[in-house]
Structure formats: structure tokens, C-alpha cells
Image (cartoon, rainbow, N blue to C red):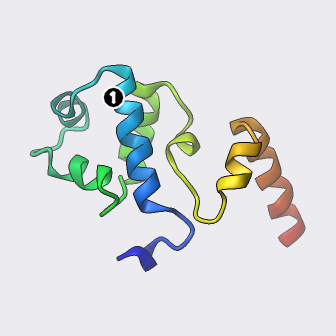
Amino acid sequence: MKDIYPNIDMIKTGQKIKECIQKTGYAVKDIQKILNLSCPQPIYRWFKGQILPSVDHLYTLSRILEIHMEELIVAKNDTAIAEKYSGEQRLLSYYRFLKKVA
């Protein structure tokens, strides 16, 4: 399962999503209603790092939590970089990296 998303640390991403939701005071039932989910199970699976939210759900989460989508995702082997750069700096660094690779 973890090989599906080789660049994303699913466990740490799930923990980050859970932490952000808890910080803002939302309950799992609130998130379930906002995302129009029939049951809360996918949210608990996100928290455990078993699956990742869809892009639509990630976008909606970022809007209600008032943070950038990228802030909800934790990259594998990128912890030092994530700690070193803020969101805007990381985006700029990533853009420069893409220009070099292209």
C-alpha cells in the first residue's frame, strides 16, 4: 500500500491532517458532513495513514482549515527540507527544481 505514493509519507500526512483538524476544533462528524461523506471511515483511514484524501477533499480541507494544501502533506525523506523552509519558500524551491529538471 505504501508503494502507491512513494513521495508522500502517508503516516505522517495522516497525523498532520488529524492534528490540523483537532487544532481548529472540528469533529470527525463535522468533516464528514462538510465533505459529504456517507460515513466517517475514510477520515479515520486518513488519520492512520492507510489512504490519502482525494484532491477534492484535500482542497476542501485546506479551505476550511485555512492552510495551503501542501501544508497538509508530509513528504518522505524531506523532513529536514520541510523544517528548513516555510510554505512559500518550499514552493519557490520546488519551482526552481522543476525548471532545472525540465
Q: Looking at the rendering, in which quadrant would you find the C terminus?
A: bottom right
* Residue 87 coordinates in the image, percent (x, y): 69, 38
Does the rendering let one see residue 102? no
Residue tagged 1 = 22
With 90 as the anchor, is 51 left or right in this view? left
Check the image and name the residue furthest to the top.
25
Residue 98: quarter of image:
bottom right
Does the rendering let one see residue 99? yes
Above or below for 65 versus 19: above
Check the image and name the residue furthest to the left.
38
Residue shown at 42% from the left, 32% from the top: 20
* Residue 16 coordinates in the image, percent (x, y): 44, 43
* Residue 86 coordinates in the image, percent (x, y): 72, 36
Q: Decide which of 66, 59 is in the foreground and name it.
A: 66
Check the image and name the residue furthest to the right.
100
Q: Say which element carries label 1.
A: helix
Disc 1: CA contacts within 10 A as few (<14), some (14-19) or many (>=20): few
Above or below for 65 versus 32: above
Query: Which amino acid, by three-letter code, is at mark 1?
Result: Gln
Above or below for 61 versus 52: above
Above or below for 57 versus 99: above
Residue shown at 17% from the left, 43% from the top: 37
Residue shown at 10% from the left, 45% from the top: 38
Residue shown at 24% from the left, 55% from the top: 45
